[in-house]
Amino acid sequence: MIRVIFYLILVAALAFGAVWMADRPGEVAITWQGTRIDTSVLVLIAAVATVVVAAVIVWSILRAIVRAPETIARYRRYRRGVRGYLAVSQGLIAVGSGDARAAKRLTAEAVRIAPREPLTLLLAAQSAQLSGDHGTAVATFQEMAHRDDTRVLGLHGLFVEAQRRADHAAALTYAEEAARHASVPVWAAQAVLEFRCVAGDWSGALERLDRNLKSRLIDRRTYRRQRAVLLTAQALAATDRERATALAREAAKLAPDLVPAAALAARLLGEAGERRKAARILERAWHANPHPDLADAYVALRPGDSARQRLSRVEALAAKGPADAEAALAVAQAALDAKEFAAARTALAPYTAAPRKRVAALMAELEMAQGDEGRAREWMARALNARRDPAWTADAFVSDHWLPISPVSGRLDAFEWKDPLAGEDHGAVIEHRAEPSVPAVPARVETPQAGPAPQAEPSQQAPPANEKRERAPRADAPEFRPPSAEEEQTPRAGEEDSRSPFFAGGRRERRVRAAAMANESRTARSDMTPVVPGVIPLVHAPDDPGPNGEPPAEPEPPPPASWSRIRALFKS
């Protein structure tokens, strides 16, 4: 609406000016070289305007003719840029989708159109990686590393290729060079840190960690955790006891939930006679993260205590943390050592419905200590088939002790105290009760003298040995009752006079065998197939230097159809 009003005002002004000039024509006389021209002002204005327009048109034509080569070159460059952009973008999409053939064709077109462009170099490197031509990829990344605008990207590609060749020295060189860049990339800083950790250079790793914090590559919480891990590793490797104690205490202070740091600091302080400080460190760590190593270290602070005193100390430690399975196991073990069987059974009761190996082994030891050999055998059978206990696990590698880095990937602080099979869906766990080597004790049923005994119903018959059983205890299982003196001396019906060799020996030998059965989960079994998670290998995104895996083979085109193939379809 405003434009319409403005247009009307402009037309009205021009009309008013034309009318005003027509009412006042005026006279103009021009004398030039003896020639006199008499005309009006309006005609003169029209002539001047005509000359100006003609001059502008002639100038535009002459200018277009003069600049024609430059205009044509600019247009060709524009068209070339559009074609190059399309080739690069479609080539990166082909690399991301894994189409090696299309990526190679588009790379050739992009190199022909824009050979020196950074994106063309990136496309050429990724296409070579996808096709398996690692020599061309390395040469392209080296060319990128010698340019200022693609230096870090080229170093990243060379680092990836060096890792693929397992050339760790070259990979470290490229990572160190990239880490010296003004804007330190995260991958370079992390790689340098991990390489120094693998080499055991804990001082250099701490220095790199401080630089990562100053560069704001990690947050303060991650820095404290990783520094505690490095200090613990340095304390384990230190030969000076005082220095190792100081490093372990600092690590326990930075990360109270880091179990190895607290256990090491407590052990060193206990050996130095500072038991109170050691106990405070262990209690703080237990409150944050209950762990059997902490309980063992807590008991070891006073090696001269009796079994009942150790039980009291473990109960006090368990009360200072959350209600956890590790606390119950620690109390149960101490109660068994002190022969407080009721306390051990009470501690293990909440975890017997779905027991793990350690719970089942302790229950077997408890039943054996109370003279119930049948129940002990049952619990030992359940220990063989129960779920694994938590262990120090990193990258599917299980270790019997904590390590600062993963031996598989070299990742710092990779070990976690967890079930090695945690996170994998392995279906329902089947508990199979092994057939006892001695005859089962028959139930005492009073039956009349006359007449045959009634047959048991099918629902009440014993299930076959290979039937699946639930984890919950049997409903018909009798409650535990301590045997009387007469029952202890009177052998049960069907029981052999001689005990099984498995239960021979003293209480210490039985405990060793129970612990060995419980720790069976950490040894490889020949009849077990390793569980491998289903992983679909994908090509890296275009912003990464390239895929790490080998390229899949190109599918061959199907052979052309022939009459013989067509006739074969109708053969019976």
Image: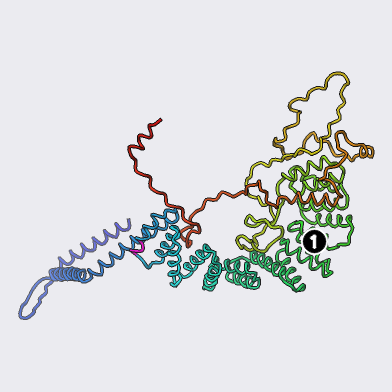
From what the image shows, is residue 125 above or below residue 439?
below
Q: In which quarter of the image is residue 427?
A: top right
522 left or right of 561 in image? right
Task: Report whether residue 340 is seen.
Answer: yes
Residue 123 % position (x, y): 41, 61
103 left or right of 76 in image? right
- Residue type, numbered disc 1: Ala
- The one nearer the camera, 385 or 197, is 385
Residue 250 % position (x, y): 73, 69
From what the image shows, is residue 293 above or below residue 54?
above
Q: Does the magenta stretch include residue 111?
A: yes
Q: Name the residue under label 1.
A: 297
Query: Which range is magenta?
Result: 109-113
Where's the C terminus, which quadrant?
top left
Residue found at x 81% / y 22%: 454
446 left or right of 117 in image? right
- The one nearer the camera, 531 or 320, is 531
Residue found at x 5% / y 80%: 34
Where's the N terminus, which quadrant?
bottom left
State the residue lying farthest toward the top: 451
80 left or right of 133 in image? left
